[in-house]
Image (cartoon, coloured by chain):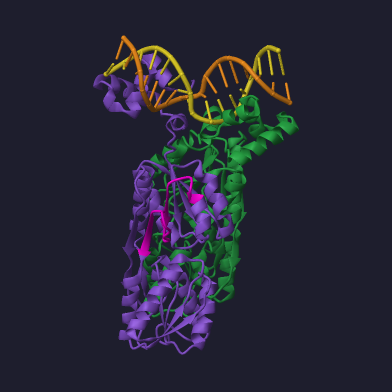
Chain colours: A green, B purple, C orange, D yellow
Amino acid sequence: MSKVTIYSIAEELSISASTVSRAFSRPELVKADVRDQILNLAAQLGYQPNKTARRLVTGVTGAIGLFVPDITNPFMPPLVRAIQQAAVERDSSVLLVDAEEDSKAELGLITRIAGQVDGMIIASPRSPSSVIKQAVGRKPAVLVNRVMDGVPSVVCDNTSALREAGQHLVDLGHSTIALLRGPSASWAAQRRAEAVRTWARKAEVSLIELGPFDASFDGGREGAEAFAASPATAAFTFDDLAACGVVAGLAERGLWAPQHRSVIGCDDVLLARVLTPSLTTITAPVDELGVTAVRLLEEAIGGATPESVRLPGTFVPRDSTGPA
Amino acid sequence: MSKVTIYSIAEELSISASTVSRAFSRPELVKADVRDQILNLAAQLGYQPNKTARRLVTGVTGAIGLFVPDITNPFMPPLVRAIQQAAVERDSSVLLVDAEEDSKAELGLITRIAGQVDGMIIASPRSPSSVIKQAVGRKPAVLVNRVMDGVPSVVCDNTSALREAGQHLVDLGHSTIALLRGPSASWAAQRRAEAVRTWARKAEVSLIELGPFDASFDGGREGAEAFAASPATAAFTFDDLAACGVVAGLAERGLWAPQHRSVIGCDDVLLARVLTPSLTTITAPVDELGVTAVRLLEEAIGGATPESVRLPGTFVPRDSTGPA
DNA sequence: TTGAAAGCGCTAACAC
DNA sequence: GTGTTAGCGCTTTCAA
């Protein structure tokens, strides 16, 4: 059995290949009964239009590139899933690239797949803007959790949720609060720190800035050391993984959350819910982030103007915060 | 500026397009100085061979499909990364598909991408063998953590590590031990249960089988209920996430690990290390699993005979187990 | 509404 | 070593 193409179908039906082609690519141009005939035979023969051939002539690949700096970061998998799901609905597939936390490699990896996709979604890149601009130049692209002039993006805006979180701490009687800063290359870390600072000034609480610390469990443990040595009774951390490290680091020093210290995470990853104590944190709307990223990318591919959207996070009090 | 092809380069250099083509696809067939000339001009013009065109004629896509049942399962991200990394070294890209735990959708999703890849790696599928066979029929494929006749696979074999873990419990004085079974559709769960049973018979400990429970945090909490109600003082769980649920579920009942009950996880995902208490578990050689999967797939694509490899897990005692 | 013909950019015989 | 010549399977004018 040779492979089935529009030609074999056309021959079988004594019609032209173009008609068969149309039956699949622009069905409305083909008379109904002919179309049905074609579709039936095709189904029977198990025919699938060859994407590669189609791609060669149309120039559209039907794939989107998804670039992540570190897939093992717990924030990523749900995002990847949301994007993947949205892509499937858009009828396109997802080419995944993981930079393995090597920001130097980001550019190379991005350009590497640029030729194989219609556009790309770049999540939380750590590279400097200039590098990203360069990578993004050739193809439509959408940034997630980072904004940059001229590039559409979707970010999670935690400003108001952080304010709520701060108020929550104040309500619990905390007045000296630590800010354990995240990596300085992280756009999100900068934004979160800024939001906390602004709130602290208004709320007239004493804010002690510590770090930067790595966005990791061990980074959190390091943070715990500084936190424990400070007069602060509560801390904002960069994300849930760091918060988890802080909780563990405090425990190593005989300090327990929430009895001795309160800890606030960010993102609400799986970890935040399964930890004991469960983490008071800020839920990121991952599904929406993913869906929006795909939508924006679709628009960008369609030639539309870059737009940027910000989705608010939601404050979730849980068990890692308590009375001062 | 029109796009640069082998023709524009050929014309510029007054040579034939085939020579330019060869300079990229089989450089050894082109005289050195001509080749250099071509490569230089190409670099200068920013020429990149069009993968789609190449693919159309050669039939190789340069992509491998990676199918995962649930990317949010903490076991997956490191595996995905390892596979992705190995693929990059093989100079091919990774098309990711996440079934979102919907085993009914597995077949459709797998066939969906079959046409766009040279072969596929199917990780821990939950579908019945017949379905997988069907999906796998058309393309070279490698299974991860599941074996099936006629399909090459790479699995993590925890038999001996589980035996060690059992001995570890016995050494700690446990003599009545629970087995909290994982999902019955999971091949790995069956294997692990079987290994524990075999060990228990030989070791003459009293084994109490409970479950099956979901491979999730909540599944673990359910398991904790049954565990707490049983006379067992220690438990094997299906994986670390379930173990985490068990620890939390026990805590809800005022039982603490390792003081009141001992808990053993499996896989050694990130969670196992950051939890308090850190989990006694079995480390899966994820990197090797990934690298091997890619190697086997490469061989299968090359037309080689299906082979199957099993890599042993390693027992790691940590803090969730203690004296009976 | 359908068919004929000309490519999309590249590779691979086959000749020179 | 290099050029010539056919396609790979599909879409898309352009005519009919």
Measuring from the top left, give residue A106's x and y in whole percent: 40, 44
> Does the magenta portion include B215?
no
Measuring from the top left, give residue B8's x and y in whole percent: 42, 18
Number of on-image labels: 0
Is residue A222 depicted above or below A158 in this figure?
below
Measuring from the top left, give residue B168's x and y in whole percent: 32, 81
Q: Is residue A278 left or right of residue B78?
A: right
Q: Looking at the rendering, which quadrant does residue A131 occupy?
A: top left
Name the residue located 42 percent from the left edge and 55 percent from the top edge: B143
- Quarter holding the C terminus of chain B is bottom left
Residue in front for this viewpoint, B93 or A111:
B93
Is residue A106 depicted above or below A204 in this figure?
above
Bounds of the magenta segment: B135-156
Q: Is residue B161 left or right of residue A196?
A: left
Name the residue located 48 percent from the left edge and 48 percent from the top edge: B137
The furthest residue to the left: B32
Q: Looking at the rendering, which quadrant does residue A281 occupy?
A: bottom right
Name the residue located 46 percent from the left edge and 42 percent from the top edge: B117
Q: Is residue A279 visible?
A: no
Measuring from the top left, give residue A66's x and y in whole percent: 49, 46
Q: Is residue B133 visible?
A: yes
Q: Is residue B131 left or right of residue B63?
A: right
Is residue B78 depicted above or below B38 in this figure?
below
